[in-house]
Amino acid sequence: MTFLRLEGLTKRFGEMAAVDGLSLTIERGEMLSLLGPSGSGKTTTLRLLAGFESPDQGRVMVEGDDVTRLEPVTRRFGMVFQHYALFPHLDVAQNLAFGLESLGVSGEELERRVARALALVDLAGFERRRIGQLSGGQQQRVALARALAPEPRVLLLDEPLSNLDPSLRERTRREIRELIRRVGITTVLVTHEQDEAFDLGDRVAVLRRGRLEQVGTPEDLYASPANEFVAEFVGRSSSIGVMILGPADRGLRVIIEGAEWDLTDTNAAPAGPALMVVRPEALRLMSPAPRALIGTVTERRFTGAASLFTILTEGGASLEVTGPPRSVRAGERVGIMPSRRAGGGIHLFPRALP
Amino acid sequence: MTRIRRVELLGGVLLLLLIWLIVYPLILVLIEGFRGPQGWTLDFVRSFLQPHEASALWGSVWISLVSVLLAAMVGIPLAFLFGRYDFPGRKILGWLVALPAVLPPLVGVIAFLFLYGESGFVSLMIQRLLGLEQPPWMLQGAGAILLVHAYSMYVYFYLFTRAGLASLDASVLEAAASLGAGRWRTLRRVVLPLLYPSLGGAALLTFMTSLASFSAPYIFGGGFRVMTTQIVATRLNGDDELAMIETVSLTMVALIALWMLRGPRRLDSLAGGRKGMAPVRVRVQRRGVRLALALLGWGLAVLLLLPHLTLLLVSFVPLGTWTTEPLPPAYTWRNYLTLLEDPVRARPLFNSLWLASASTVAAVAIALAAGILSVRSRVPGRGLIEGLLALPWAVPGTVFAIALATAFSVRAPLAGRFVLVGTLWILPLAYLVRNLPITSRAVLAGFRALDPSLDEAAATLGAGRWRTLRQVTLPLLRPALLAGASLAFVTAFGDFVTSIMLYTYDTRPISLEILSSLRQSDVGVAAAYGVVLMAVSAAVFALGADQGSGG
């Protein structure tokens, strides 16, 4: 059942709508990632949820209660800030106690719950540490424990990993995911990193210019992007203009820079000009051949099991293609064909003629 | 929505209060300078256009320009010496060099009088040594004023330059070296340009302080008049309206100087905050040079400390025992005991304590309110609030004394005017207005340095505005509040320039007691009070600085 509901949220700053008619529903215990480039309105959305901003239109509902006009103080939404916002003049335990004291918890009960919250993030025994003495990762865990200690209704995370060393991020991501699952709290997090959004979110909402482009599981977004923005923004991809001719014997026939391809594993689209957004693993390299798209290798990047090649086509488009590490060299002329198992990696979006 | 309205209402109240305290009195001065018994008139402007008036104004300007030059010539090399080189005794000397800052202006002036005046220690000693009939020099006129200014104002250049040097990025100097720039070229093309904002700030501060300087011209000026002393003299002659015109002209010079010297500020972004490591001090290796530097440093320190030591020495001189000897023949605790035991002599001490405390509390409260409303709540009109708070800094103290005396000597409650002159309240009010710029600058800077998400974090944790203020904002602001409060207290405690125009016998502050003791040749008590001012200033400064770094 729906726990948290955003209904047509709109927030304008001057002329510009930072959030524009955004509606979302979040289940109890679900983790939702808000993903988008900077300026997409994801942070404003989070601040609307926390109550730091009040929307020009729309409502925020928790379990059927309208909380739109509730002050942050009474809203009981916990938040982990991008730079943690730990109180530098208080020690770890005092930071954790801060929210509990607001609820009137005191004495032994307070100590017990502080200790429990610290144990939750694996920092038992850190009560009397000063904030300045903690590493970045520890500060992040204290911030998480502080937000969780008063048992808020919803947990909000603002770019939770952006302040950490890259080497720490993956481990911390795992820890956060496990911790939130264990607590079972409904969570909304904001990030511009797709990996983070996919890894932490049960579902991901992609935002652009304050509007919701698509919401769904990571698999949905990857396999069936709703539009070219989502297709290009989510996962690695390149795009090229094509002309859709119509159904062929096998799949859909398209013409790309003169090469005729029959696409078997793609979305249905009407005949006419279109943009093809394609994942690197949905293409394969071969020797120049009649039905292949012809281009020159401009770059090769080694990524482990396979290499990623950048091909400049004769028509001037740049495509990324995965292939065996040493199959071709930079400067070589190659042909490109759709791979036999494209795995839903080719998407067609009709567009008007320029 | 109601909360936002309340904040805006409070912002409006604060704005009105500031306009009433700061702008209104200045406007009244402007108006009254152009009004005679028969309505509007330019009579007073005409009487202002006299040669001796122009020479006083010119005197103010050139004394200030030369003061900037002298202060820079002393302060900048000292800052380089202590900021860039390492030699024995550097730390303690670097600290001693800033000591003139704890001498309130009047105290510094009388210390110079005891040292270099006609019957000062140094003058008398030289006279004896050379067997002269007359003292070797007269401590009078422009030269004497400039000497005192250079002594008390080089500290601005010293501190600003040291701060600028400390914020240099060492890698910039290394880059210059790796590009083949020698020491001089690096200094000229890299270090000095990066220091421009600091030097510009110091120059502006020195110029404004010097323009507003009153104690030195008042005591040493003799026939040499500057505008501040001219205003007081005119006022004492009863030419109130002429004094107003003089006040307006001095204010205009101050504002023009402020506007002209703002230029270097644009370079602020250039120097910015520190991005890398501060340059390491050059350790002086050659033994001869080390010794020379150390000697130079200590010699300098003694020279700078002489006024303080003199004051201490003179404070033990019994009344009427010291006449022509180079050193006083007798010493006693009597003077200090007098301050404690004689209720008449002790009164100024208590007066200054409560006047300074009251004005400090008020200044901190207003600065705090301004910080909450302007930086935190971002009320409309916040630019105006901050501008008004900074304004008294550009206006010489004499001007404000006249302005407040004008505004608050008339009973017209509907026009916001009350008779405060002659009451207890005029002095704390004057100190408050004078201290608003320094206090609010410190407090507003503290507010800006606070991460706004700390407030938001407190809110999501269920803390209301009051609890957030008490448990998060105020503890984190403590260093800024203490710094602002200590500066305000020290300035008010040693104030002379506004006090001399507004005091009453019941509210006479320490500075006026020093003056009257001096007039009665009771140098011991004058010096003892000087020592008290010095010691309290130093203690309060130390408290502010200690808390500032410890928090």
Image: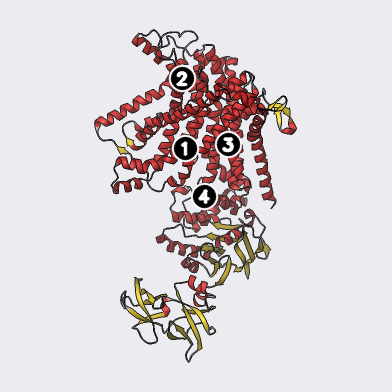
Disc 4 sits on a residue from what chain? A
Label 2: which residue?
B111
**Crowd tier of the residue under label 3, counting other residues whose Cα lies within 10 Å: few below 14, some 14–19, many 20 or above:** some
**Crowd tier of the residue under label 4, counting other residues whose Cα lies within 10 Å: few below 14, some 14–19, many 20 or above:** many
Query: Mark 4 is on which residue type?
Result: Ala
On the image, the x and y values in percent for residue A125 come to 46, 51
Q: Residue at x 47, y 39 (%)?
A: B550
Instruction: Say what secondary structure mark 1 lies in.
Output: helix
Instruction: Say what secondary structure mark 4 lies in.
Output: helix
Q: Are marks 4 and 1 on the same chain?
A: no
Residue B344 visible in this rendered orientation of the protein: yes
Query: Mark 1 is on which residue type?
Result: Gly
Instruction: Say what secondary structure mark 2 lies in.
Output: helix
On the image, the x and y values in percent for residue B222 come to 50, 17
Nearer the viewer's eye, disc 4 or disc 1?
A: 1
Disc 1 sits on a residue from what chain? B
Query: Mark 3 is on which residue type?
Result: Leu
Label 4: which residue?
A93
Q: Are marks 3 and 2 on the same chain?
A: yes
Q: CA distance from mark 3 to mark 2?
A: 31 Å
Query: Mark 2 is on which residue type?
Result: Ala
**Numbered circle sitting on residue B361:** none
Q: CA distance from mark 4 to mark 1?
A: 44 Å
